[in-house]
Image (tube, rainbow, N blue to C red):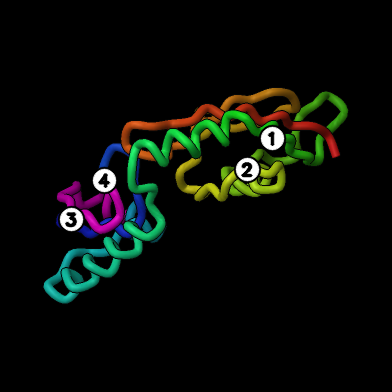
Amino acid sequence: MKIILTHEVSGLGAAGDVVDVRDGYARNYLVPRGLAIRWTKGGEKDVEQIRRGRRIREIATIEQANEVKARLEGVKVQLKTRAGDAGRLFGSVTPADIASAIKDAGGPDVDKRRIEVPQPIKTLGAHQVSVRLHAEVAAKVGVEVVAA
């Protein structure tokens, strides 16, 4: 099935790309989550609009990405959340929580979709997350989760 990506999907493509995927993956995962739309001749007109929006939000050069990476890795991110007696969180820390904590700590604005959390963060303590800034540049950010 041919689809048009509306958001970046790891391992598949960036927003505005027209890709061919299995029917079930498109129908059950990508389209319901708003990550893609079905390809049609009318939808082809939307591709340029999506690409234009991506160019505005995207970090254009590797040099800019390296500057943002240096700023990100220099920021101490502390996230306060509710936790039980044993240090277990009520729920988990989401990429949106991490993005707002980075901004609160004085770091640059980071799109929550660019934050990759390898394992769900469900405990207090220090955790490492990755932020994809460019196709070739990713920053490692340390997140300290403390009880509120």
Across and down, in percent, residue 32 comes to 38, 60
* Residue matched to label 2: 107
* Chain part drawn in magenta: 13-28
Marks 1 and 3: CB-CB under 8 Å?
A: no
First along the sequence among labels 2 and 1: 1
Q: Would residue 131 be counted in the magenta stretch?
A: no
In front of the other: 139 or 126: 139
For label 3, the crowd category at 10 Å Cα-Cα, with few meaning under 14, some 14 to 19 and many 20 or more, is many
* Residue matched to label 4: 13
Across and down, in percent, residue 69 comes to 49, 34
Q: CA distance from mark 4 to mark 2?
A: 27 Å
Q: Looking at the picture, which amino acid does disc 4 mark?
A: Gly
Q: Could you say which disc has been placed on residue 64 in the image? A: none
Could you tell me which residue is drawn at 84 percent across and 33 percent down?
84
Q: Could you say which disc has been placed on residue 18 in the image? A: 3
Label 1 secondary element: strand
Q: CA distance from mark 4 to mark 1?
A: 29 Å
Marks 2 and 1: CB-CB under 8 Å?
A: yes
Q: Would residue 23 be counted in the magenta stretch?
A: yes
